[in-house]
Image (tube, grey):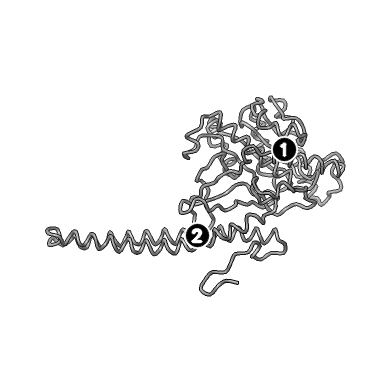
């Protein structure tokens, strides 16, 4: 219980929900909204204080008598003092709310299940592949400039309702400006590999498959953990022939499942059709894609999520500028994330520009290899 005059101590899972995972999910989104609204209130108060100061200065200096002697200086000092006082009060309120949110984050983070946890969370070291799909997946962290050390996990619901695009191009962020093009592309593919590994680790054994298209074979290094562990549905597809083969297979799956769903005839699906969730990881788009392949990819991005085929694309939009506005619907349909910190995401309540930071494996850690080994062991135990 809280002491008199003090806020209640935060508790992990202190939200509505039928399960602990759902309560934590709702609590995290509640923290997200609280931080967004607290920052909005602070910024509004600061804007009001500065606006009032400007109005007071205009009134004071509009009188010619205040332009000589010390009257003008006194008016400026008084207006500035009032502005500083209002700003300080607003900051005190914000600091109290930030402290409460930081205390809540400190108890919530250690209690998160693997699907919601960062790669540095100890929960991964005792992770067992679940028998049921989680309700959400963590794909990064968000923070605002008012307090950069207060991070809110960015959770997306499962199954994925839209694909993801890891932007490997240069952005306006300072982090991207410090890296060369090759380093950015490698980081983008490493980010995609971590997302694919996390999805494999949180789905039941054999219920999630990962296909990779790497037309030029440029992502052999980042893909090594997945390839070495043997968790991919097949070798990474290379060249125009490999691209066409993978896209044809997944397009066929989408078509067949859609027809079965519409006809309410799931039993009529071919016995060799994998009805589990599928993830297509595409590196260096649109390299290796002809017009037909681009059309198929757009089709998978639009129609695939509703029948369990999802897209995770690594691309620099500048590389596809020759297509002009034809690909604009594709880019808009995907959730854009970055391999480095970048303030491009907006919240749904007040529209702040949040800094997104991708999840990374701690330096020297072998947690990724351990997790992939657990995926392989769970598949063998399940006979998949």
Which residue: 30% across, 64% down? 82
Which quadrant of the view contains residue 51? bottom left
In the displayed structure, 65 sits above or below 342; it is below
Instruction: Return the residue nearer the eye: 262 or 43.
Output: 43
Q: Which residue is mark 2?
A: 98
- Label 2: state its secondary structure: helix
Residue 161 image position (x, y, % from top left): 66, 49
Crowding at dot 1, Cα within 10 Å, few <14 / some 14-19 / many 20+, comes out as some
Alpha-carbon distance for marks 2 and 1? Answer: 36 Å
Q: Seen in the image, is 9 located left or right of residue 122? A: left
Circles 2 and 1, Cβ within 8 Å, touching? The answer is: no
Q: Quadrant of the N terminus?
A: bottom right
Residue 351 image position (x, y, % from top left): 49, 54
Residue 275 in view: no
Q: Which residue is mark 1?
A: 369
- Label 1: state its secondary structure: helix
In the displayed structure, 173 sits above or below 57; it is above
Residue 211 image position (x, y, % from top left): 73, 36
Q: How many marks?
A: 2
In the displayed structure, 84 sits above or below 174; it is below
Q: Seen in the image, is 218 located left or right of residue 90? A: right
């Amino acid at each position: 219980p809280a002491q008199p005059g003090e806020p209640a101590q935060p508790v992990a899972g202190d939200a509505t929900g039928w399960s602990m995972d759902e309560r934590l999910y709702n609590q995290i989104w509640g923290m997200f909204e609280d931080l967004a609204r607290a920052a909005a209130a602070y910024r509004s108060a600061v804007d009001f204080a500065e606006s009032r100061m400007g109005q007071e200065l205009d009134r004071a200096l509009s009188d010619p008598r205040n332009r000589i002697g010390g009257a003008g200086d006194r008016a400026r000092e008084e207006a500035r003092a009032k502005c500083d006082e209002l700003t300080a009060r607003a900051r005190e309120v914000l600091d109290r709310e930030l402290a409460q949110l930081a205390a809540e984050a400190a108890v919530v983070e250690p209690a998160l299940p693997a699907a919601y946890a960062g790669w540095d969370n100890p929960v991964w070291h005792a992770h067992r592949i679940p028998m049921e799909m989680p309700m959400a997946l963590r794909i990064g962290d968000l923070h605002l400039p008012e307090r950069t050390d207060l991070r809110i996990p960015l959770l997306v619901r499962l199954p994925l309702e839209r694909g993801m695009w890891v932007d490997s191009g240069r952005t306006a962020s300072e982090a991207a400006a410090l890296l060369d093009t090759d380093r950015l592309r490698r980081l983008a593919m490493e980010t995609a590999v971590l997302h694919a590994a996390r999805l494999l680790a949180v789905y039941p054994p054999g219920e999630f498959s990962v296909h990779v298209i790497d037309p030029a074979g440029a992502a052999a290094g980042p893909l090594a953990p997945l390839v070495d562990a043997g968790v991919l549905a097949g070798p990474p597809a290379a060249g125009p022939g490999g691209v066409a083969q993978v896209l044809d297979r997944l397009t066929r799956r989408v078509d067949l499942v859609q027809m079965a769903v519409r006809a309410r005839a799931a039993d009529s699906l071919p016995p060799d059709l994998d009805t589990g969730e599928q993830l297509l990881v595409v590196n260096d788009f649109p390299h290796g894609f002809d017009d037909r392949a681009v059309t198929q990819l757009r089709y998978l991005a639009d129609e695939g999520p509703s029948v369990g085929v999802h897209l995770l694309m690594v691309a620099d939009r500048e590389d596809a500028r020759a297509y002009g506005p034809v690909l604009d619907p594709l880019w808009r349909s995907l959730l854009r994330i970055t391999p480095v910190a970048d303030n491009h995401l907006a919240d749904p309540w007040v529209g702040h520009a949040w800094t997104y930071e991708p999840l990374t494996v701690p330096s020297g850690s072998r947690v990724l290899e351990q997790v992939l080994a657990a995926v392989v062991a769970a598949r063998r135990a399940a006979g998949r």
